[in-house]
Amino acid sequence: METLQLTVNEIKRVYNGPNDTILLTYLRNQLGLMGSKNGCGTGHCGACMVIVDGKAKRACLVRMKQLQGAVVETVENLSKEGNLHPLQAAFVNHGAVQCGFCTPGMIISAKALLDNTINPSDEEIRKALKFNICRCTGYVTIAAAIKDAAKALREGKELKIQQEWNGIGTPVIRQEAIEKVEGKPLYTEDLPVKGALHGELLLSDFAHAEVISVRTEKAEALSGVAAVLTAKDIPGSNVVGIITKKQPVLAQGKVRYLGDAVALVIADTPEIAREALHNIEVTYRELPVVMNMLTAAEDSVHIHDDGNILSKLHIKRGDISEGFRLSDVIIEEEITVPMIEHAYLEPDAVYAVPEKDGIITVYTQSQSSFSYREEIAENLSLPLNRIRVVTRTTGGAFGGREEPTIQVHAALGALVTGKPVHMVMSRKDVLLRTSKRHGEILQYKIGASRDGKIQAFQANIIADTGAYPSAGEAVILRSVLFAPGPYQIPNADIQGVAVYTNRTPAGAMRGFGSNQPAVASEIVMDMLAEKLNIDPIELRLINGLESGAHTVGGQVLDTSVGLKESLEIVRAKLAEELIPSSSGSRRIGIGIASAMKNVGLGSGMDDSASAIAELTHEGIVIKVSSVDSGQGSDTVVRSIAAEVLNIHPGNIKLITNDTAVTLDGGVTTASRQTFVTGNAVYYAALGLKNQILEIAAKDHGASIEKLEIRESNILESRTGTVLNTLQDIFLKKGILSETNTYTAPVTVPVSEITDNLNRDDEPFRLHFSYCYGTQAAIVAVDIDSGKVEVLKVIAAHDSGKAVNPAGARGQIEGGIMMGIGYALTEEFLMDETSLITNTLKKTGVPDIEMMPEIDSFLIENLHPLGPFGAKGMGELPMLPTTPAVINAIYDAVGVRVTHLPAKPNTLKALLEQQKSEKEAAR
C-alpha cells in the first residue's frame, strides 16, 4: 500500500492504495475524471494522455508509486469559467473532432507541446503526437488546429466557436464536439451504474475443437461470484449473425476459433470474475485447423456441418472468349490483400440494467440500436418491448459494430441476476473476437484492344470469412460486382467464393467488399496502360463509366456519374504540382487510381428509415436512429432539418438511437444515412413546417404560400412582419409532430441480377446510387531500406451535394489515411494456436508521422432523389488511396507489389530480386 500526495487539476490530493495502481484507474475510478480514455491499456493509442510535471504521459503506463509530489493535469482542467482553451476551440472549428474518443488525449499532447513551444514546426507537432492514434480524421485537421491555437496563444487572442450558418453547404461544427474536447463522460465505459456486477468471458483454448464438457462448480463456489453461465442457460436462440445466424453466443458442442466464448462469469468485481475464469474446467477434443483460404473449400476438415463454403457467386456478361479474341493486349495477375482490424479506439463496452417494469435497458455502442434489440430479444426469448437499447456516443466503428459482441452476454447476466451488469472488452479481446476486413486472393485477367478499350475481364476471387458468416455473403457479392472497378466491361466472367477458416470472423468494414477489388482492378489497369503505352488517366477516361453506360452487373447508370470529372480534376491538379526530384537513395513516383462505391443497401433489400420532427417547449426536436460514430451524420441531419425549417442547426435538438423514443433508421452502413435518413428528416421537417405555417396562416387569415419561418419567428415573406413565434404556436396547440418513413428506390435481388445480365432492353437497379472518386498519390521510396513515404494525395470525389463540406473533407482525409495503412502497414495475423496481432501497435494503424499533404476536391454532381442532391461519402475515400500508393511505388522503383501490405522488408526483397534479375540478364 502507498500513501502519497499529489496535485490533480490544481487540487491537492492524498492517495492511499496499492502502489502499482495505474494513474488512469485512479483518475477514472476514484476521481471521476473520465476525459482520459482507456483505449488500449498498453500505451499504444494515447487516448489516456495527461500532463505530469509539465510533460505528456500515457496514464495507462504510469504507476501511482511514481507520483509522490507530482502535478497532474487532465483535459478537464483546460476550459476555465465556461471558456474553452484555444486548443479546444481550434479542434472544434477545424473539424478535428470526429468520433472524439482520441480527442482529449490529442489535446493534452498538444497542450504539453504549446506550454513549451509557442510556435511549433510541423516536425515538432508530429513528434509531440507520435504516441496518439486517430482512426477517424487523418490528422490533417488536428495539425491545422494546433497551429491555429498556437497563433492565438502567441497573439493573446481568444478563439471563439464559429457558428455562422448560410444554409446547406455551409461548413458546420459538430454540436457534440464541444463536449468531446472537454472530455465529458459520453462513452459507455464512462457511464457509472451503482451496484453493477461485472462480466467476463471464458474464451476457447483452441482454434478448432469439440467441447466435451464444461464444469463450473469451482467457479460458482468463489465468494463474490453471482453466476457462471453456459450455453444451456440461454433462454432463446444461441446464435447471432447479420445475415446467416451461425455464431454462438456461448459455444456448445464445438469451438471454431480462439475467440469463441465458452462461459460467462458474473461477479462483484472484474478481479473476482477473472479469477473465476481460471476455475472453470473445460474438456476439449482438439480438431485439425483450417487456415488456408485457398484450399479451404476443398479441405476434408469441415468447420461447419455443411462444409467450408459460405457463399458463391458467378456472373457473366457478353462472350468472354470473343472478348479476349478481340484483345490485342492481355494482362494476368494475382493480388492478395490481408485481413485487417477496424481499430476503432473505443473498446466494446456495455451496461445492461434491469428496470423495475421488467424491461432490460442496454447502454452500448452500436451501428443500430434496433438490430441489437432484435438480437438480444431473440437470444433471451423476450418480446421486443422488454428490451430497450440506447446507443451511447460511439468511439468509431467503420463497420465493426454492426453485430453484437458482448451486449447479449451482459443482458443475459442482467436477466439471470436481476442486477445491472457491466462488461468492457480488453484491447486484446477486441483484436481477437471482433470482425475484420476480409483477406482476399484476387486472380485477374483483362484484355484490351490497341485503342485502349477494354474487351474482356475475368476474375476469380476467394475471400476468407473466418469462422462464422458475419456479413461475408454480402461482402463477396460486392467484391464480385465491383471486381473490374468503375469501367465499362462488355464481356465478363467473374466468380467469387467466401470460405470458412478457423480465424476470427471477417465482416463489414469501410468499403464492404469493394476495397479488395479496387486494389486489384487499379493495379491491372496500370499494367494495361503500360503495355498499351497509354497514359493511365487517359486509359481510365476511355473506359470510365458515365451516364447511359452499363455496370458489369447490367445496371444502366442514369444521372450523377462523376467519375470522368474526378479524373479530369486530378489530371489538371497534377499538371500544376511541383513534383520533387529523385535524389540519392530516394525515388519519387506518382500513382493514379479511381473507384466507385454504392450508396445504400441495394440488391433487393428493403432500405428505409424513419424520422420524427416535433415542435415542443424546447423548440424544434428531431428524432432519428442513424448512428453517428464519427462520420458526422448527426450534423448532416441537423443541417437538412435546418435548411427545410430555415433555422440555425445549433437551435435544433437531436435525439438519437433510443429504441424507446426513436424509430428504426436501419443500420449505419453502406454510406446510406445521408441519403435515406436524410430524406426521412427532409420530409418530416417539411411536414412539420407545413403544420406550423398552416396554423399561423389560419390565425391571421393569410395565405400559407406568403409565410415563412425565420429562426424562432413566423413572418410574412414580403414585408418581414412577424405574425407568430414558434413558442406561440406551441403554447396554443401543444406538441406538433410529423413522422416520415422514407424508402429508397427499389433495387433488384441477386437472383434477378444474375438472370438479367444480358437483357439490355430491361433496365434495373442493383443500387439506387453510386459515388465516384479518383486520387493521385505522390510517394518517395528509399531503395536502401524499402520504406515508403506518401508525400501528397490529390483527391477528387463525387458524393452529390456536400451537406457539410467540412465533414465531407474530414471523411476524405480519414479515408485516405486508412487507405495508406492498407497499402503500407496494416495486416491482422494469427496462427493455429495464437493471436499474433495482439496489440494495437501491431495492427499497423498509421500515426501522424505517416500523414501526407492532402488536397481534396468535392464534385457536387447532384442526385435528383437525394436530400438537396446529396448521395453519400463515408466509405468511398479509402478505396482509391491504396492502389494509388501501390501504383506510385511501381512508378518510383519499377517493382509491382501484388501482396499487400508493402512493408519495408517486402519492398526491399522485391528490389533485391529486381537487382538480381537485371544482373542475370547482363
Image (cartoon, rainbow, N blue to C red):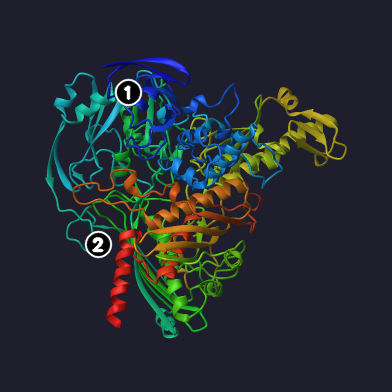
Q: Tell me what residue is drawn at x 23 percent, y 40 percent.
A: 251
Q: Which of marks 1 and 2 is in front?
A: 1
Q: Which amino acid does label 1 sit on?
A: Met
The mark found on residue 778 in the picture is: none
The mark found on residue 64 in the picture is: 1
Callout 1–callout 2 Cβ contact below 8 Å: no
Question: With respect to residue 768, does 115 lie above or below?
Answer: above
- Does residue 318 appear in the picture of this structure? no
In the rendering, at what x and y percent does residue 861 appear? 63, 59
In this view of the protein, which residue sits in the foreground, 586 or 201?
A: 586
Q: Tell me the element at label 2.
A: loop
Q: Tell me the element at label 1.
A: helix
Using the rendered view, name the quadrant where residue 919 is placed: bottom left
Quadrant position of the C terminus in the picture? bottom left
Q: Which amino acid does label 2 sit on?
A: Ala
- Residue hosting label 2: 297
